[in-house]
Image (cartoon, rainbow, N blue to C red):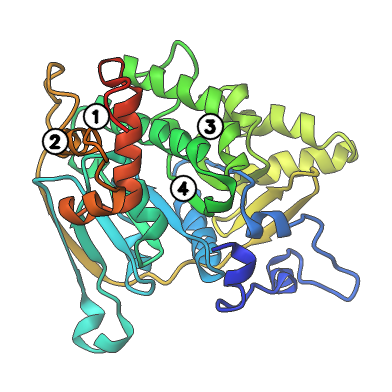
């Protein structure tokens, strides 16, 4: 369903309400210079920059809350900090964790006022990235969270997991007809954990993921996928990645980290204003952020903190590197191959009902099977 149709159900955000976030306080002549319509409609990538503790995660969650409110579907990558659980008690969420791992969440507010607290649904994530995306696009609630890093010691594991997920997302986006495309906001907290400049990657898998995104990130917005990410330092993402983000939001930073960006994006302001902004980014409080829009208009805004619920979480489980010699296809793929090789082939819907999968997941699996050289011409 298109976002303009959803707005008939979900109340839109009044852009003038953002006026209250301006600093100094708005007056009759105050205006919001940055353009937010494109951000709220989706399809324009956003990068949040700031030093550790500057409030990047809080800002991401605030923005996702806004987008969710007007009907967007959210897929959020948690970096292991689980800060999203503050929101999970107020917004219905589906949390996905790896097989063999556990996560239990308890909100202390449920003891005194249980009616106002949502208990997030926690499920084992499918092994096939296509099924993860299928759930994010179609399964309610509309806010999905991937908790993977919290169960990893080896940094190559999250890189491989998200590399496979990104490749599947890009493949799925390009293979889906225009009339069937759906809006999705894919949010990566601490994008720099996974994408680093050439020659600085932690592992070969990180290097591979960086190359995948360098080449494909621009394609996502053409297929109605919006990427919202954060990074500690601009130079941790190469220029090919940074140039794909339409909105740049700068939290408190080290001056040298933003100097080059400011020099290229504040060319129309006076020298005194330029140095004021550069210095301000080094000492401003955590609620403030400089926002640069696709037309290079900018504002200094402040956003209130998210509601912070008192919760406790218990986690167990450890993911180990997979055997590189492990099989490429699973038993469900074998059944699909056999049934689609029959004459006439078993329908996608009948296979979905038999295997307990979504029809689109069966279709995407069959498409991959048909693309394999050994299968070419054998299945329909």
Label 4 – label 2 distance at C-alpha: 23 Å
Q: Could you say whether the residue bearing mark 2 is in a helix, strand or loop? A: loop
Q: Please name the residue that numbered disc 4 is placed on.
A: 187
Residue 56: in sight, yes or no?
no
Q: Could you say whether the residue bearing mark 4 is in a helix, strand or loop? A: strand
Query: Which quadrant, please, contains the C terminus?
Result: top left
| Callout 2 crowding tier (Cα within 10 Å): few <14, some 14–19, many ≥20 | some
The circle drawn on residue 252 is none
Query: Which quadrant, please, contains the N terminus?
Result: bottom right
Left or right: where does residue 333 sit relative to residue 70? left
The circle drawn on residue 319 is 2
Label 4 – label 1 distance at C-alpha: 19 Å
Q: Could you say whether the residue bearing mark 3 is in a helix, strand or loop? A: loop
Sequence-earlier tag: 4 or 3: 4
Q: From the viewer's perspective, is the residue at label 4 or at label 3 nearer? A: 4
Q: Please name the residue that numbered disc 3 is placed on.
A: 233
Label 2 – label 3 distance at C-alpha: 29 Å
Label 2 – label 1 distance at C-alpha: 8 Å
Left or right: where does residue 251 sit relative to residue 136? right
Q: Of 317 and 169, which appears nearest the observer?
A: 169
| Callout 3 crowding tier (Cα within 10 Å): few <14, some 14–19, many ≥20 | some
Label 3 – label 1 distance at C-alpha: 23 Å
Q: Please name the residue that numbered disc 1 is placed on.
A: 157
CB within 8 Å, label 3 to label 1: no
Q: From the viewer's perspective, is the residue at label 3 or at label 1 nearer? A: 1
């Amino acid at each position: 369903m298109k976002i303009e149709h959803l707005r008939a159900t979900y109340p839109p955000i009044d852009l003038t309400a953002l006026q209250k976030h301006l600093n100094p306080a708005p007056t009759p002549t105050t205006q919001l210079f940055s353009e937010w319509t494109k951000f709220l409609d989706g399809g324009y990538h956003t990068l949040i920059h700031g030093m550790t503790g500057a409030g990047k995660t809080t800002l991401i969650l605030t923005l996702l809350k806004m987008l969710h409110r007007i009907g967007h579907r959210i897929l959020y990558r948690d970096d292991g900090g689980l800060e999203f659980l503050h929101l999970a008690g107020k917004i219905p969420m589906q949390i996905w964790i790896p097989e063999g791992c556990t996560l239990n969440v308890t909100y202390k507010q449920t003891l005194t006022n249980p009616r106002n607290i949502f208990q997030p649904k926690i499920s084992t994530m499918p092994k096939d990235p296509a099924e993860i995306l299928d759930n994010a696009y179609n399964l309610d609630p509309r806010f999905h969270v991937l908790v993977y890093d919290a169960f990893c010691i080896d940094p190559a594991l999250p890189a491989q997991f998200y590399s496979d997920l990104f490749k599947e997302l890009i493949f799925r986006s390009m293979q889906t007809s225009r009339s069937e495309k759906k809006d999705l906001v894919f949010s990566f907290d601490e994008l720099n954990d996974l994408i680093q400049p050439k020659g600085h990657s932690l592992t070969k898998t990180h290097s591979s993921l960086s190359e995948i995104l360098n080449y494909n990130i621009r394609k996502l917005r053409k297929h109605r996928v919006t990427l919202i990410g954060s990074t500690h330092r601009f130079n941790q993402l190469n220029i090919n990645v940074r140039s794909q983000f339409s909105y740049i939001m700068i939290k408190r930073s080290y001056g040298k980290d933003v100097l080059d960006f400011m020099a290229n994006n504040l060319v129309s302001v006076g020298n005194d204003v330029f140095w004021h902004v550069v210095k301000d980014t080094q000492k401003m409080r955590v609620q403030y952020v400089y926002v640069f829009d696709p037309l290079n208009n900018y504002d200094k805004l402040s956003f209130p903190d998210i509601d912070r619920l008192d919760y406790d979480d218990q986690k167990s489980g450890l993911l180990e590197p997979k055997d590189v010699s492990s099989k490429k296809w699973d038993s469900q793929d074998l059944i699909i191959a056999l049934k689609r090789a029959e004459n006439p082939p078993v329908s996608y819907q009948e296979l979905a009902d038999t295997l307990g999968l979504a029809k689109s997941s069966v279709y995407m699996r069959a498409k991959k099977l048909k693309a394999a050289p050994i299968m070419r011409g054998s299945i329909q």
